[in-house]
Amino acid sequence: MAKETIIHTVLSSGLQIKLKQQAHQRTVNLGVFISHGTQDEDLQTSGAAHFIEHVVFNPNYLPQHLQELLNSLLEAGVSYEAATSKEYTRFMLTCLPKQIEQVLHALSLLVSSRHVSDAAIEHERPIILHEHAMHFSSSAVLKELLDHALWGDHSLGLFVIGRKENILRFDRQELEERLHLHYVPERTSLVALGPIDVDSFVEQVDHYFEPWESSPRNFSDPIVVTEPRLAALPTNSSRIDLLIGYVGVPSDSRDRYAMDLLADILGGDLKSRLFVELREKQKLAYLVHAYPTTYALGGYLAIRVNCNREDLPRAHAAIQQEIARIKADGVNEAELARVKASRTRAVLMTLENSPQHLQLLGRRATRNDDFFVDLETRRIETVQAEDIVRLAEEIFIPKNIAMVGFGPQDEELLQLI
């Protein structure tokens, strides 16, 4: 494999530039990642980052000159998307190499824009309310509900979509104040991936982004309090969607790789323990899956199962039995080799998926870290069976359990523990 290099430059304004050359690509992926998301909110501001994404970075409500520039790029085949997460707000564009300068120009205007339109606010408010209602009326809410069950009303426990009362309240003054405070160069990373001429790219970034400045300031650390609890969204359905979370490790922990592999052993694929036991042997469920979630401020290992309401106690008992087996009997070398190979394959596949590759680069950039495929695969390979068992013993304990369900009553969850 060719040597991986990330070129890292910082402008005088504090804007970070991270450039990874990929000569085999025919397109260029560019992303702006702003370190402002749900983790920077509280109950009174919950949903502000998502609301700003809708009204400020929506191509339909940009200042006229920027709207014309971005529309000309979209007409020329450039793709554009914006999103809000727990840790950051991002917008990403994919273009041809010859369009890089125009895209950089558009991005520089986009990130430095402080324009909040009253018309945009009133147009987007009912749309966001529809999104809010849709989010809380399906099992799609389960993952964030588990975040809330772990961290409550603090930072990571808040919902990206925000609180309904805040969505109804947000006005131009409040959003503009937040823009001026958080959407600043020193909280922003510009990430690029593709066949790029480095000198030309850095020169263009310097030219277009140089005017974007702000006054240096200190930012307080988000408050995170881990208090695992239960949460149920009752329905009349005969089926239950259950999600069990165990407090794990944050993204900067070296045990993150052991947690990834532990999740894969439990419920990562067709050969995983929970899939074989719950679906193939006991026929208790069609969907059973385990996955890790890591943020800079915390992490967890989650297990999800969808089953008939009457089968919920048996399904939960089977999950606990498989967890107990790992703690008591360990992990065999064949099993470990299988999940390492699977996890390595997934990492290597990012080289074939440039938007996902850029997303990983940008996410790491917001944490002052880099993403190297070769380094990731080496860290996966260093994990030993005893590392996984030790981690299982540390995280699979009663005080670490959070549990959420779409379908059950509170009493049904309480009976499980």
Image: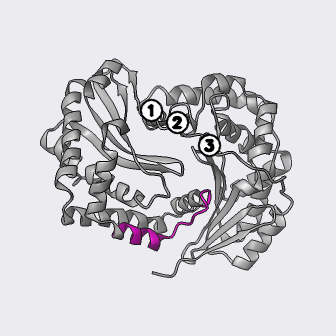
The kind of secondary structure element at disc 3 is loop
Q: Which residues are magenta?
A: 365-381
Q: Which mark is residue 149?
A: 1
What quarter of the picture does the C terminus occupy? top left
The kind of secondary structure element at disc 1 is helix
Q: CA distance from mark 1 to mark 2?
A: 7 Å
Q: CA distance from mark 1 to mark 3?
A: 18 Å
* Amino acid at pointer 1: Ala
Q: Earlier in the sequence, mark 2 or mark 3?
A: 2
Q: Is residue 370 magenta?
A: yes
Residue under pointer 3: 222
Q: Position of residue 154 (x, y in %)?
A: 56, 35
In the visual, does 155 lie left or right of 245? right
Residues marked 2 and 3 touching at CB (< 8 Å): no
Residue positioned 66% across, 39% down in the render: 49
Residue positioned 58% across, 34% down in the render: 161
Residues marked 1 and 2 touching at CB (< 8 Å): yes
Q: Residues within 10 Å of mark 2 (few under 14, many from 20)?
A: many
Q: Is residue 194 magenta?
A: no
Residue under pointer 2: 157
Near-viewer residue (94 or 224): 224
In the image, residue 134 sits, relative to residue 60, either above or below, namely above
In the visual, does 156 lie left or right of 204? left
* Amino acid at pointer 2: Gly
Residues marked 1 and 3 touching at CB (< 8 Å): no
Say if residue 19 shows up in the picture.
yes
Q: Position of residue 338 (x, y in %)?
A: 25, 64
Q: Earlier in the sequence, mark 1 or mark 2?
A: 1
Q: Nearer the viewer, mark 1 or mark 3?
A: 3
